[in-house]
Amino acid sequence: MSFPALELIAWPYHGGLRDVSMGLGGSVLAADQELRAGIAAADLSVTVETIPPVDESLPEVARVFELDRRLARRVAAACARDAFPLVLGGNCCSCLGTVAGAGADGVVWFDAHADFDTTDDNLSGFTDVFGLAILTGTGWRALRETIPGFAPVPEERVVLAAVRDLEPYQRERLEASAVRTVPGAFDRGALAAALDALAGDTARVYLHVDLDALDAGVGRANPYAAPGGPSLDALLDGIGAVFDRFTVTSAALTAYDPRVDDDGAIADSARRITALIARRVAHQRLTRARH
């Protein structure tokens, strides 16, 4: 039996600018031959697409939302031909286009940071830290509704794991929300319990892997890498636990800045994560075909 394709979709943008900072990681990973070989080893064919840039004279927010509109269309096209979309993103706001294009009733999000800021409490002005908040229906309503297929995911249908690097206002907002959190170097049982609870609400999820979810001792994914996170093996186990329970409609690796990955440990981690996702996608599709 031949398996469907996996489509690598590079969204190499940081603040809507191509190949800058964490945006560079999307391009680097998309061109990585070892990463592609890991997909091929799972008997999946692989194609690579890159979301084209927008006019850099546009304001940051306008750039980001236009790039998400383009991403949503590309992801939807991949799904229409039965290809699994794996987005290699710069900033986490790529989630808006990915979920809009592929659809999902829930989210499992691995990240050292909450990305749950609102325009009322944020001081940085950095769109990256709004991603999960917008995805769950807070902020930028008019703009988010311009993304083809976008529908907010309820907070109670989100599991946020490995989160730890939070400002006090971010911690307060997260604790007041309905998001299920499994903080830091998460316990396997605690993650399983959160995933089991989510499985009671939905069977279809988007999988988001911010590479700084990994403990800084594993490697530095970007300048915001933080201690107190999971090892690579623990993160791989967590990703496997997601596939054990859900149909994963799409996935993303985000926030990789190769300029600070001095020893290549994060690039190697990204290859191993991608290979695991590819194996589980192949199994997921095979299981579906049998039924």
Image (cartoon, rainbow, N blue to C red):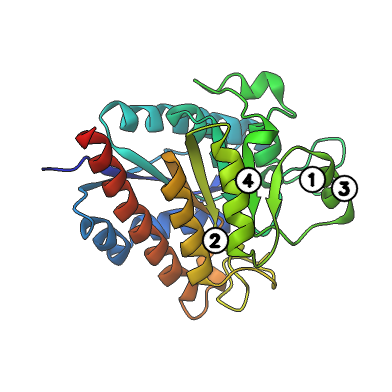
- The crowd level at tag 4 (other Cα within 10 Å; few <14, some 14-19, many 20+) is many
* Tag shown at residue 103: none
Between label 1 and label 2, give the one nearer the viewer. Answer: 1
For label 1, the residue is: 174
Dot 3: element: helix
Residue type marked 1: Leu
Q: Where is residue 257, by image quadrant?
A: bottom right
| Of callouts 4 and 3, the N-terminal one | 4
Residue type marked 3: Glu
- Does 190 sit above or below residue 70? below
Contact check, label 1 and label 3, Cβ < 8 Å: yes
Contact check, label 1 and label 2, Cβ < 8 Å: no
Dot 1: element: helix
- The crowd level at tag 3 (other Cα within 10 Å; few <14, some 14-19, many 20+) is few
* Tag shown at residue 172: 3
For label 2, the residue is: 211
Nearer-the-camera pick, 250 or 235 = 235
Nearer-the-camera pick, 66 or 253 = 253
How far separated are the C-alphas under marks 1 and 2? 20 Å
Between label 2 and label 3, give the one nearer the viewer. Answer: 3
Residue type marked 2: Leu
Q: Looking at the picture, how far across and down is residue 136, in whole percent?
A: 67, 32
Say how many tags the image has: 4
Which residue sits at x=45%, y=76%? 264
How far separated are the C-alphas under marks 2 and 4? 16 Å
| Of callouts 2 and 3, the N-terminal one | 3
